[in-house]
Amino acid sequence: MYGLADSIHIVRVDFAIHNLMIIDFPRDLWVEIPGISDHYGITHGKLNQAYLFGNPGMGYYDGPGEGPGLLARTLDQNFGLSVDHYLAIDTQTFVKMIDAIGGVDIKVDTPIDLSYGYEDPGPDIFLSVGTHHLNGEIALILATNRIPSTFQRMKYQKIILTAVREKLLSQDMVSKLPKLAAQFINSVQTDLSPNDINSLICIAQSVTEENTKADSFPQDMFTASNIYDPYRKVTTFIYEVDFDQLRAMITEFQNGIWPMP
C-alpha cells in the first residue's frame, strides 16, 4: 500500500470496562520522522508522509511495520503516543468493505455539496439534510472530500466511522463479523493476529453507543502555515501546534480520561 496516509485514526480499546475511544490526527502536522535521516538527510515532513517513507520501495526505512510501523514510531517520538497494533486499508478495499456490509446510513445536519471544489467534471452529488444511504463509492467520495478544510474532512470521516460501527453492531450483522474479517484479512495491512481479531470481534459485540466516543483535537489548537518541504522541493501547507499541549491531551487519551463517552 503506497501513497500518503489519507486518514489517521487512533483507537483505544479498554477490555476491562468495554470502552472504545477514537481520536484523529490532522495529516498536515509538521513532525520529525525518525529513521530516515540517513537517506538524503531528510528529518522532517508531514505526518502523513511518515506512512509513505515507511514503504519498502521508497528505500528510506527498514524497520518493522513498513508504512504503518514508521507512522506509529513518528506518533510516539513526537507526541508520546504508544501504538500497540496497526491496520491500514487502501481506498479500493474501503469501497469493497462498505459494499460488503450493504452500505451505511448517515445523518446529515447541514447540506453537503460534494461537487464543490472539484475540477470539471466533478461528482454530481448533493446530500440534503436528513438520512442518506451510501454505497462504498459515495462513502469514499465523502470521506476524502477536503472542502472547505482538512477538519471538515475529518468530520465527514467521523460520520462514516459512526455509521459503520452502528451497521456492524446491528442485530443482523454481528453474527457475520467473523466471516467479514476472514473475507478481508488478506486485503489489509496489519500486525493483528487471528486471536487479536477474534478478541476485538468479541468486545465489539458488547460495546454500547454510550461506551463509544470519537473526538478530534480542538481546531483552534492548530495554526495554518507554510514551510519548505525538502522531499518534494516545494513550499507546502502545514499545521503548526503547541506540541506540549497536544502531548498533554494524548496522555489523557492513553489514560482513558479524554475523550469521555
Image (cartoon, rainbow, N blue to C red):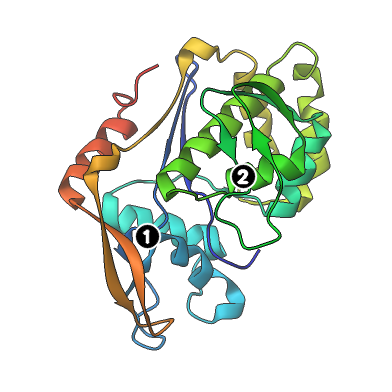
Left/right placement of residue 56 relative to residue 98 reads left
Res 132 quadrant in image: top right
Residue shown at the point (60%, 33%) measured from the top left: 160
Q: Position of residue 26 (x, y in %)?
A: 39, 50
Q: Which residue is mark 1?
A: 74
Would you say residue 27 is visible in this rendering? yes
Would you say residue 33 is visible in this rendering? no
As drawn, the label of residue 114 is 2
Pointer 1 local density, CA inside 10 Å: few below 14, some 14–19, many at least 20: many
Badge 1 amino acid: Thr
For the residues marked 2 and 1, what is the alpha-carbon distance in whole angstroms? 32 Å
Pointer 2 local density, CA inside 10 Å: few below 14, some 14–19, many at least 20: some
Q: Position of residue 28 (x, y in %)?
A: 38, 59
137 vs 216, nearest the viewer: 137
Quadrant of image for the C terminus: top left
Res 237 quadrant in image: bottom left
Say which element carries label 2: loop
Q: Earlier in the sequence, mark 2 or mark 1?
A: 1
